[in-house]
């Protein structure tokens, strides 16, 4: 007997009968139909790791809320992405993250905190990370007091993009942190400075040194910043670069995550090799 697997799945999404290709996740189905589900550890160019639980939704018959980013749609399932229980769960996730981390440089999380009415001050004894900022080179800094342990940098450094495996999660419980092998300083580690970890970090825990320096001055002004698309001039691959500038000075280079060549990832030259455009001698001095 030949068993044929249906190539489509029909289920209820917020009361609407919805049909998607088999294997589609709840998040992808929601995105296809214009239903918004917040995410933190998920990214279109990385494998889902189910670390944050921000994307949870209610599935009838399931005792626990299910993660939309990795759960595939099931035939006849009844999914609610916007129930009271879902909203409360997301609010608490955001509050827990806000009590332990500095989220002020993540505009997406700030928007969600407001949307779900998350109030970290409800917790009388927050456990803030007190990791000092690691400034070990001129390319990027690591400010782990902003790190929400989403695993994105680890995935990007590993088998989702770079295959360098210079960083991974170390420790347990409150001691869990992103680390190089034996906490080796980055310049002496296996890191090849592709910056793909920086490109996927959702909280600015990893950020360009040029951006970090600019943020220390009173001149940091998001309103006046622009992003210009160009093609990397270093080799024939032709990666698209988004060059972020303020006052005609580059402070960051990214690539679109939906780009067919880069999927948002670059090499050290495209990511950090812009010094020939603006040698340090042309930059105004900073105060530290
Ligand atoms: S810069 Fe590249 S190699 Fe270095 S830690 Fe980040 S992802 Fe890994
Ligand atoms: S450094 Fe950034 S990308 Fe890495 S785990 Fe922390 S928040 Fe996520
Ligand atoms: S976005 Fe789904 S678990 Fe983090």
Image (cartoon, rainbow, N blue to C red):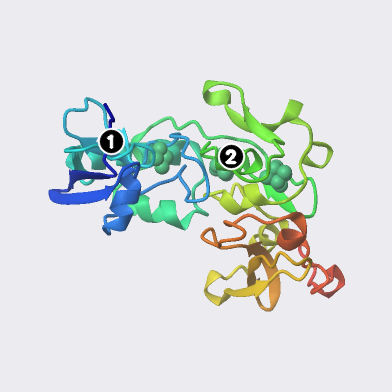
Residue at the image point whose x is 28% and y is 40% from the top: 73
Quadrant of the displayed image that contains ligand 1: top right
Residue 124, percent from left and from top: 38, 32
Residue 4 badge: 1
Residue occupied by mark 2: 155
Q: In this rendering, is residue 1 above or below 80?
A: above
How many marks are shown on the rendered structure? 2
Name the foreground residue: 176 vs 151: 151
Task: Give the quarter of the figure containing the C terminus.
Answer: bottom right
Residue at the image point whose x is 30% and y is 33% from the top: 66
Task: Give the quarter of the figure containing the N terminus.
Answer: top left
Q: Nearer the viewer, mark 2 or mark 1?
A: 1
Residue 214 visible: yes
Residue 265, percent from left and from top: 63, 54
Is 206 on the left-hand or right-hand side of 140? left
Assign a secondary structure to mark 2: helix
Q: Judge the density around disc 2: few (<14), some (14-19), many (≥20) Cα neighbours within 10 Å.
A: many
Is 27 on the left-hand or right-hand side of 105? left
Q: Judge the density around disc 1: few (<14), some (14-19), many (≥20) Cα neighbours within 10 Å.
A: few
Q: In which quarter of the image is residue 119?
A: top left
Name the foreground residue: 211 vs 285: 211
């Amino acid at each position: 007997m030949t068993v044929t697997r249906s190539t489509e799945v029909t289920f209820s999404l917020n009361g609407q009968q919805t049909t998607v290709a088999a294997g589609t996740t709840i998040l992808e189905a929601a995105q296809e139909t214009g239903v918004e589900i917040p995410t933190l550890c998920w990214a279109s160019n990385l494998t889902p790791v189910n670390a944050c639980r921000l994307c949870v939704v209610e599935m009838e018959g399931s005792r626990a809320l299910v993660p939309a980013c990795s759960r595939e749609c099931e035939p006849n399932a009844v999914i609610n992405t916007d129930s009271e229980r879902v909203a409360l769960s997301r609010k608490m996730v955001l509050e827990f993250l806000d009590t332990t981390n500095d989220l002020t440089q993540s505009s997406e999380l700030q928007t969600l905190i407001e949307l779900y009415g998350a109030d970290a001050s409800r917790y009388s004894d927050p456990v803030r990370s007190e990791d000092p900022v690691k400034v070990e080179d001129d390319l990027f800094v690591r400010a782990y007091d902003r790190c929400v342990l989403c695993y994105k940098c680890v995935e990007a450094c590993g088998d989702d993009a770079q295959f360098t495996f210079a960083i991974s999660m170390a420790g347990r419980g409150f001691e869990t942190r992103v680390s190089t092998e034996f906490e080796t300083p980055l310049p002496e580690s296996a890191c090849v400075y592709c910056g793909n970890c920086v490109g996927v970090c959702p909280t600015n825990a990893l950020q360009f040194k040029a951006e970090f320096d600019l943020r220390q001055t009173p001149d940091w002004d998001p309103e006046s910043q622009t992003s210009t698309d160009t093609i990397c001039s270093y080799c024939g691959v032709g990666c698209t670069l988004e060059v972020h500038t303020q006052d005609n000075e580059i402070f960051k280079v990214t690539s679109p995550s939906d780009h067919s060549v880069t999927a948002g990832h670059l090499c050290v030259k495209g990511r950090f090799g812009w010094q020939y455009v603006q040698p340090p001698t042309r930059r105004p001095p900073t105060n530290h």
